[in-house]
Image (tube, coloured by chain):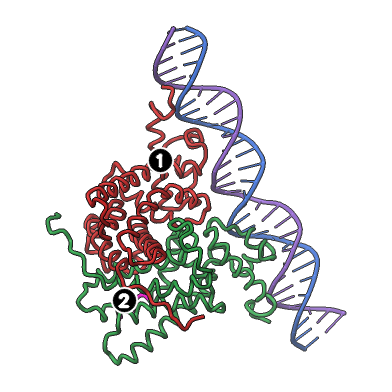
Chain colours: A red, B green, C blue, D purple
Amino acid sequence: MKNPRDGQSADTRERILDVAERLFMEHGYEGASMRQITGEASVNLAAVNYHFGSKEALLQAVFRRRLACLNEERLRVLDRLEAEAKGRPLKPSQIVDAFFGTMLRMAQDEDCGGQIFLRLLGRTMTEPAEFIRTFLAQEYRTVLERYKAALFKALPDVPHAEIVWRFHFMLGATSYAIAGTDALRLVTDWEIEEEDAVDRLDRLLPRLMSFLLGGLRAPLPEFGVGKK
Amino acid sequence: MKNPRDGQSADTRERILDVAERLFMEHGYEGASMRQITGEASVNLAAVNYHFGSKEALLQAVFRRRLACLNEERLRVLDRLEAEAKGRPLKPSQIVDAFFGTMLRMAQDEDCGGQIFLRLLGRTMTEPAEFIRTFLAQEYRTVLERYKAALFKALPDVPHAEIVWRFHFMLGATSYAIAGTDALRLVTDWEIEEEDAVDRLDRLLPRLMSFLLGGLRAPLPEFGVGKK
DNA sequence: GTAGCATTCAAACGAACGTATGAATAGCTC
DNA sequence: GAGCTATTCATACGTTCGTTTGAATGCTAC
């Protein structure tokens, strides 16, 4: 086995990635220590540096493992939709579902990450560490360009700046929704407890889609003309 | 001067709070070190523990200083609106503006925090540290109860669970919008550069309000009946 | 069986962390 | 100006951090 990514080490690598994914989600990048990660993964402390090189590289590996899968699927779905449309603009609902729906449906597929990664993703987009944001921006670049273009085409009467802002709002609403079933406790305390966890995720998608589409298609804002 | 909060120490306290506010925003709670904070504030390392007791207490002091101001204003505005309505339900747009608009307008008032605190607030709601979320939930409890109740009354046909979810979505969209003029770079790269920073904040409120209201008033989701 | 390689392991490194201590300094009252 | 208190300061403490090292281990191939 010449390739270090094969063989018996695969167990170790995967176990580290799984635990790191969960602990980064629970405690953040700085809050999750190497000793905690290697401890819960039952591997030696030095294993991370051996297999990945550094803590930064570990985080990137955690993300790449899932994001590759997710963003390729997003591009495939958009390709297919645009092929079917034969040059005509897509419906906004199709685009929003292709982007956000694909992500939430991915959470049901344990091979592709599951809920843990989804919550990690939601949390991480606001992580303060510089290298994380740069890394994510880079990983997302292609997908975002394509989806932005699709939205521009689907909403020809809406200024591009407005679409970008609303895309941003949609990202925020979604990140929050998935990052914090915890943070939701801040706003609910009990209100939703009756639904079990499975139902909650099943129903999150339609709920979110309604909200996002309502926001995306809302009347354009009127900037106060008297100002400045 | 018997009270440690008066006298010449006020300078030190305030300087620490100002710097801590900014550094917590830039690097997060764990990422901002005491030495960095005291260094940039030009005070002794021990000053924080003398004036506040601990790093946790410092963070709470940073938030309390601004949140008190913000949430009291939110309650005042809601009180006034409800008094004027004389028992009739408020309009959703009034409630959303009273909650989110008050916050964004506060950012223009430098006495009450300014943009730095606003961005800190946006970032912090997803901070992983347990004590932070507990603290914030506690600080927000009263205000959220009041606003939820107002929304329930304003939208009598919408199930409470849906309103709570949409409140959550609105919080997420707003946090993102203000947390990251940085994170926006992830989605824009250049698209919005033509607007200077002042205009951007002026125009954020109408943009956000349109989006939030569109989402809040969107048609209710239909949960797939075939599912489970 | 031994050479070569990938992997694991225990142990240690230096740096940075939050916190604590006790002496020095400044401002006020009497 | 003596005495008191509030504040500042330099310094050190004990931990924990991410990373490194060099020896041990297991596997494969010849």
- Mark 2 nearby-residue class (10 Å; few <14, some 14–19, many ≥20): some
Badge 1 amino acid: Leu
Q: Which residue is mark 2?
A: B148
Q: Is residue A110 left or right of residue B25?
A: left
Name the residue nearer the viewer: B71 or A91.
Answer: A91
Residue density around tag 1, few if under 14, some if 14–19, many if 20 or more, within 10 Å: many
- Residue type at mark 2 is Lys
Picture layout, residue A175 above or below residue C26: above
> Taken as a whole, is the magenta stretch helix, strand or loop?
helix
Residue A15 image-quadrant placement: top left
- Relative to A87, is A44 above or below? above
Question: Residue at label 1?
Answer: A17
Question: Measuring 28% from the left and 68% from the top, which residue is drawn there?
Answer: A214
The picture places residue A133, in percent across and down from the top left corner, at 48, 52
The quadrant in which residue C27 appears is: bottom right
Task: Determine the chain carrying the residue at label 1.
Answer: A
Q: Residue A136: x and y, percent? A: 45, 50
Say what secondary structure mark 1 lies in.
helix
B107 or A7, which is in the foreground? B107
Chain letter of mark 2 equals B
In magenta, the rendered stretch is B144-150
Q: Position of residue C1 (x, y in %)?
A: 47, 7
- Residue B143 spot, x, y in % from top left: 38, 77
Image-quadrant location for residue A169: bottom left
Query: Is B213 included in the stretch rendered in magenta?
Result: no
